[in-house]
């Protein structure tokens, strides 16, 4: 997020940066005004057992097991399903390629989010593409210092498998969600979703490409709900 | 000869049979070697292909299309990925590149093994629906499979394509989720198409693809192989067959063992006509060479045997001749001996038979001479007759002696004989005899001189020689007797004056009954010298005529000295 400010020589870019700054500011203002009226859900998702002890806590990779795509060590995405108004402006997200892997390995975004795919290798090309029904795209080959940073706007909800045409083992997962209310759990499966609107909803926990748990929730203003999956 | 011929014939037969077997084995080995070489090349090719195909099926886009439910993108992605492996029929590559295996077509099979139809057949190689259906593999194999695809069966463009099915394993599930089937033009061995060259093809799905053979021959072969595969070897086989009356050696071998695709066989037929012709020619050459060798051998052995036999035969003839001659000689000798014996016996008998009447005659004459009233002339006459009887007795004694010598019955009883004394006695006797010629007798003798001999026979020799010397002398002539020892021998010479012995007579004077030409006037019976010589020789010496000229005739006798006897172990002196 530091890049926009450093590129002062580009007027258009400055304008965009200012606009995004304004957008995040407005979200912050909205959040702070409704925070007391909003509900919160917290709990824990029972994550699949890790097959091997994690080498580094922060290093995730996409693994396949019995045809199921998930992360290792396992992570889950908890989100509130329902119809929400689409915000006018969504923050740009990034999935970088570093050491021949996607970072982060799993990213959840709201529909309409623009995701950048910067190549952070020293001198390795990448060719990120996806044949997933939710989004087919092909960024072509690009160098580490490719400008502008190749990006894709994900406008359909669904799971997108990210691949590299050059490095066949590389896999990344992008969960495109229709809702703005989602969070990725920590390694222990704990999560906390706050600022939720009151109402009757379905809370879902995406664990891997085949497993999504769901839980009906009634949210009341100012209350905090505890939900454990499954 | 029969044995040699038989051995040679059986040797030739065995050699020929062995050559026959060798030819068949060589052909089979050639085929196996060719096939092995082909398979090695194929293996290398497969390895290259497989490597290429494995990298193809690992391509992320193809995986993405299959795994991420994007089958519509499968063939388009593959078109990009397989671009360099597909043969561009419209734009043939230069030779070096086209020699690399290029695919003629490819198709994907889905997870059930059914064919995934391509959106645009032009991009993936056009195949008929019948051909496409042969590519399906149910269930989907877990490993690479090799098969063959017959295209345009029975048409001019009939070809066989080699197909490789590569399973595609999901990177997510590790299961085989699809397969890529790629068709290649099979590796073609550069074939010479002479009438005697090997023809090879492929048998697949009850159909023999062997365009090098004429259609009817192909049909016959097709049926044969189909039968053989049903009844006999399912993997490889070789046998001799006839196709439209011509002999061939047939080989086939399974090309794709344990493949999920239908079995395909490499088939090759070797025309044997030329081999047979060659073999025939070889057989004849061997036979003729063998016969010629045999004949030469016989000829040579015959010549050698002849040459060896010739001297033997000659020897046999010679020895036969010799034997005949010897027999003849032996017979002659035997008859001569017999005659000699007979004549000797005759002389002896005759002498004995004669002696008695002579004695009777002498005694009768002596009776008559004793009468006192005999007229003097009758007395003289009877005296002469009486003298003749003595002469007759002497002749008979000589003959008896001779015949005894001839019969080999006379043996000298050697002793020491005093030659001087003996000569003196005889000279005394000579002097006592009436001497009408008035001869002068002289002797030069050592005082004693002993010779080896028997006195009575030595005496006979001296008597003969001295009587001759007196008899053949002239009136008032001389007789000279000498004796001496010289060089281990004792020499006695008796010389006398008188008419010479004619030169032509000299060699014959020692023969029996020979007398000098003038001898008829002198009394003698012609055996004296002969007897003397025979006796001297029995003494171990000799008697020779030394000289005979107008004045002087001289004989020389050689005796052994008496002391020789001691040396020779005979009776000592």
Image (tube, coloured by chain):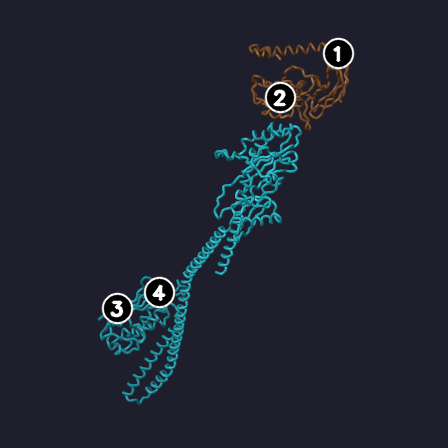
Chain colours: A brown, B cyan
Seen from the viewer's position, the closer of residues A199 and A133 is: A199
Q: Is residue B480 visible?
A: no
User: Observer-nearest residue: B54 or B148?
Assistant: B148
User: Residue B308: x and y, percent?
Assistant: 42, 60
Asked which secondary structure carries label 3, the reply is strand
Q: Secondary structure at mark 2?
A: strand
Q: Which residue is mark 1?
A: A37
Q: In the picture provided, is A206 more to the left or to the right than B337?
A: right
Give the percent coordinates (x, y) of residue B411.
40, 71
Sequence order check, earlier mark of 3 and 4: 3
Q: Nearer the viewer, mark 1 or mark 3?
A: 1
B399 is higher (above) or lower (below) than A142 = below
Give residue B305's quadrant in the image: bottom left
Which chain does tag 3 point to?
B
Q: Are marks 1 and 3 in contact (CB under 8 Å)?
A: no
Mark 3–mark 4 Cα distance, whole angstroms, equals 24 Å
Give the side of residue A54 with respect to residue B103, left or right: right
Q: Secondary structure at mark 1?
A: loop
Could you tell me which chain the residue with mark 4 belongs to?
Answer: B
Whether residue A220 is visible? yes
Above or below, B482 relative to A154: below
Residue bearing the label numbered 3: B547
The 10 Å Cα crowd at callout 2, few under 14, some 14 to 19, many 20 or more, is: many
Q: Which residue is mark 2?
A: A101
What chain letter is assigned to the residue under label 2? A
Depth check, mark 1 against mark 4: the one in front is 1
Q: Are marks 1 and 2 in contact (CB under 8 Å)?
A: no
Between the C-alphas of marks 1 and 4, the distance is 193 Å
Check residue B561 in the rendering and tell me which mark sits there, or answer none.
Answer: 4
Q: Spatial distance from mark 1 to mark 3, Cα to Cα?
A: 201 Å
């Amino acid at each position: 997020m530091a890049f926009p400010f450093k590129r002062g020589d580009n007027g258009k870019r400055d304008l965009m940066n200012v606009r995004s700054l304004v957008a995040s500011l407005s979200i912050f203002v909205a959040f702070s005004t409704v925070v007391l009226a909003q509900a919160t859900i917290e709990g824990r998702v029972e994550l699949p057992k890790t097959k091997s002890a994690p080498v580094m806590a922060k290093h995730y990779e996409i693994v396949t097991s019995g045809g199921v795509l998930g992360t290792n060590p396992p992570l889950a995405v908890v989100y509130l399903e329902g119809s929400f108004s689409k915000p006018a402006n969504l923050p740009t997200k990034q999935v970088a390629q570093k050491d021949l892997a996607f970072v982060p390995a799993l990213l959840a975004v709201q529909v309409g989010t623009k995701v950048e795919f910067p190549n952070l290798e020293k001198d390795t090309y990448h060719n990120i593409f996806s044949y997933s029904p939710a989004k087919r795209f092909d960024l072509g080959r690009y160098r580490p210092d490719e400008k502008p940073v190749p990006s894709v706007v994900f406008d359909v909800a669904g799971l997108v498998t990210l691949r590299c045409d050059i490095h066949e083992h590389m896999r990344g997962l992008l969960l495109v969600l229709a809702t703005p209310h989602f969070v990725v759990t920590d390694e222990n499966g704990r999560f906390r979703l706050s600022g939720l609107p009151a109402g009757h909803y379905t809370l879902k926990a995406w664990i891997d490409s085949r497993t999504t748990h769901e839980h009906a929730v009634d949210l009341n203003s100012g209350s905090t709900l505890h939900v454990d999956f499954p | 000869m029969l044995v040699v011929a038989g051995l040679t014939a059986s040797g030739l037969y065995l050699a020929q049979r062995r050559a026959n077997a060798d030819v068949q084995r060589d052909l089979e080995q050639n085929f196996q070697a060719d096939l092995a070489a082909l398979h090695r090349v194929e293996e290398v090719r497969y390895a290259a292909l497989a490597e290429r195909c494995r990298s193809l099926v690992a391509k992320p886009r193809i995986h993405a299309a299959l795994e991420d439910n994007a089958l519509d993108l499968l063939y388009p992605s593959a078109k990009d990925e397989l671009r360099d492996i597909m043969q561009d029929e419209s734009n043939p590559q230069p030779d070096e590149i086209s020699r690399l295996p290029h695919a003629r077509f490819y198709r994907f099979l889905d997870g059930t093994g059914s064919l995934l139809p391509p959106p645009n057949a032009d991009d993936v190689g056009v195949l008929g629906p019948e051909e496409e259906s042969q590519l399906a593999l149910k269930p989907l194999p877990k490993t690479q499979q090799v098969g063959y695809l017959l295209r345009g069966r029975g048409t001019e463009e009939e070809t066989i394509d080699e197909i490789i099915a590569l399973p595609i394993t999901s990177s997510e599930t590790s299961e085989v989720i699809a397969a890529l089937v790629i068709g290649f033009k099979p590796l073609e061995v550069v074939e010479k198409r002479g009438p005697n060259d090997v023809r090879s093809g492929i048998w697949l799905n009850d159909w023999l693809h062997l365009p090098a053979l004429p259609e009817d021959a192909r049909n016959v072969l097709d049926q044969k192989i189909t039968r053989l595969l049903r009844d006999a070897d399912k993997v490889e086989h070789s046998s001799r067959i006839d196709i439209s009356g011509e002999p061939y050696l047939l080989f086939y071998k399974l090309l794709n063992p344990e493949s999920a695709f239908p079995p395909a066989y490499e088939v090759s037929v070797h025309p044997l006509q030329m081999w047979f012709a060659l073999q025939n020619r070889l057989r004849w050459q061997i036979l003729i060479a063998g016969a010629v060798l045999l004949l030469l051998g016989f000829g040579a052995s015959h010549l050698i045997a002849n040459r060896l036999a010739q001297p033997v035969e000659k020897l046999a003839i010679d020895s036969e001749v010799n034997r005949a001659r010897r027999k003849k000689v032996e017979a002659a000798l035997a008859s001569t001996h017999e005659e000699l014996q007979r004549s000797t016996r005759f002389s002896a008998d005759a002498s004995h038979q004669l002696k008695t009447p002579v004695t009777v005659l002498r005694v009768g004459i002596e009776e008559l001479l004793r009468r006192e009233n005999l007229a003097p002339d009758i007395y003289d006459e009877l005296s002469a007759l009486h003298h003749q009887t003595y002469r007759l007795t002497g002749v008979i004694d000589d003959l008896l002696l001779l015949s005894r010598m001839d019969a080999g019955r006379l043996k000298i009883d050697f002793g020491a004989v005093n030659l001087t004394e003996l000569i003196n006695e005889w000279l005394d006797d000579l002097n006592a005899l009436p001497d009408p010629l008035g001869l002068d007798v002289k002797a030069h003798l050592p005082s004693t001189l002993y010779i080896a001999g028997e006195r009575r026979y030595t005496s006979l020799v001296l008597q003969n020689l001295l009587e001759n010397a007196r008899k053949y002398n002239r009136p008032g002539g001389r007789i000279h007797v000498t004796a001496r020892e010289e060089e281990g021998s004792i020499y006695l010479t008796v010389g006398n004056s008188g008419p010479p012995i004619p030169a032509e007579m000299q060699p014959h004077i020692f023969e029996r009954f020979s007398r000098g030409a003038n001898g008829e006037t002198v009394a003698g019976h012609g055996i004296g010298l002969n007897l003397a010589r025979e006796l001297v020789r029995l003494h171990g010496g000799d008697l020779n005529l030394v000289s005979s000229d107008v004045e002087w005739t001289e004989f020389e006798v050689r005796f052994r000295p008496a002391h020789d006897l001691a040396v020779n172990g005979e009776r000592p002196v």
